[in-house]
Image: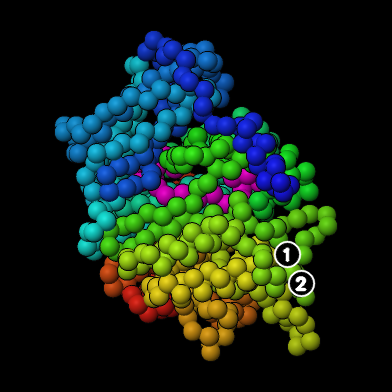
Amino acid sequence: MKRRAFHHAALALALAPWTRPFAQAATAPRWQSNPFALGVASGMPAPDSVLLWTRLFAGFDTELPVGRHESLTVSYEIYIDEARRQPVTQGQIQTDAARAHSVHARVTGLQPGRDYWYRFTCGNAVSAVGHTRTAPAADAKVQQLRIALASCQHYEQGFFAVHREIARQPLDLVLFVGDYIYETSNPANPLAAQRQHLGGTPYTLQQYRQRHAQYKLDADLQAAHAAHPWLVMWDDHEVVNDYADDLDPFYTEPARFLQRRAAAYQAYFEHMPVLLPAGSTGWATAPLHGRTPWGQLAELWTLDCRQWRSTHACNDPQRRGGRNVVACDELADPTRSMLGAAQERWLADGLKASPRRWQLLAQTTQIAPSGLDPSSADGVRSTYTEAWDGYPEARKRLLQAVADAGQKSAVTLGGDVHHHLAAQLRLAPNNSASPVLASEFVTGAVTSRGLGPGTLATMRKSNPDLAHASGDGRGYALLQVTPKTTRCEFRATAYPVAADATLATQAVFEVASGRPGVEKA
């Protein structure tokens, strides 16, 4: 058995999730404070179902009114009207400390393409009301899909005004593509005195739970979750910056790092509107990638760029991870992958089988080239190894899969790089003789600081495939997909994001159905 397979198998046995039967439920508790302080959320919309989420949380220093091995019963109610006069269904979920008292209720038997409202109760406590929406029927001729694309929300680097605007937008769903929490803290951050992380760097399950809970206490983030269903994908900061598969930047022994990764993954699943897939063997190998059809209009793919990626090319002996390199022969290694071989095959097969007009490939970083040309003629172009530039052969396979599937309306959606970006995607990047095969939109960060204007100006000049790249504001991307076009409006506000910040339109781009390539609107 290979080293990584052995480590994964060992951890799967040690960390098998949620297999212990529930203990006898305690009597309905009488709460002295709001146990739904982390809010409510929904996700994984399907034509006949949606996943509802909450977590019972009395405070960081307050014990729930049950023993550690007792369970609590949480009831949910779902309605067809906002006034909650027309109930649709209700049910009960038991939860306990092994799940951090999180609640995941998959509500089935719903109608496709419909709005619903929901809430939870436990004892004498009642949650806030959330709104969600099911996906359209598989054969529905949908005329519009409205998405807010977001990523990178360092709590200490700004307020979540972006989420306040997202909550007010008329959307079908929110697509969050990584760095929902940050494991790092920096007292030099401009707003750190007002928004400090609790505790130090997380390593254990309890520490990751605390970090997620602190983020979930933010009122604007709660509002965005309560307003719309979410589709989510993790990136690196949900565990540790720049990790790749079972290797972290600090050359930690892989089995030890996988224990940390398993703790981080468990806390992520506990705090997000996602379910551990059936047949999963443990938190050490928890798959998150998937696809969501939206009628006949679009297929939305969420791709995991962390769990199975090859380690970075030409790593620094002192610290693994993304860095600028020159003359790195490893970049040309065809065995290196961003998605892992199995996920690559799954995506390629799915693209060939999909009959839908638009293929929206949500991944967690930038696919378009970002290398920097030298300032002098005798220099060498540098390559940053963290994004897809560091995996050029994998990028070719991804775009070849789009071409082989005959998909002419593929749009990739990303985050991570902290700047708004619109770009053309070719097999041979920046080569006008190579046809454009797909289009790319990347959202800037919700709060996290981006590159300086000088570096971005050099990046644009070095890469003619970039139609737009601007890091002078924090924000999100507002997408409108119709049978004829996919429109992307980049919304932005100044850094750092103030509590009362408002957003403005930075730029607008469109992609025409059946004609790859972004155009300024």
Query: Extreme left residue here?
Result: 86
Q: Which residues are magenta?
A: 221-240
Q: Are marks 2 and 1 in contact (CB under 8 Å)?
A: yes
- Amino acid on which disc 2 is placed: Cys
Earlier sequence position, callout 2 versus callout 1? 1
Give residue 357's position: percent from left, percent from top: 32, 68
Query: Extreme right residue here?
Result: 317
Q: Residues within 10 Å of mark 1 (few under 14, many from 20)?
A: many
Say which residue label 2 marks. Answer: 328
Q: Residue at x 65, y 36 (%)?
A: 11
Relative to 520, is 392 on the left or the right? Answer: right
Specify whether residue 444 is painted magenta: no
Say which residue label 1 marks. Answer: 313
Q: Nearer the viewer, residue 134 or 47?
A: 47
- Amino acid on which disc 1 is placed: Ala
Q: Residue at x 42, y 30 (%)?
A: 103
Relative to 296, is 465 on the left or the right? Answer: right
Q: Nearer the viewer, residue 467 or 256?
A: 256
Gap in Å between the C-alphas at discs 2 and 1? 7 Å
Give residue 363's position: percent from left, percent from top: 51, 59
Give residue 322's position: percent from left, percent from top: 70, 60
Query: Extreme top residue here?
Result: 27
Q: Which mark is residue 296?
A: none
Give residue 18's position: percent from left, percent from top: 51, 28
Q: How is the image coloured?
A: rainbow
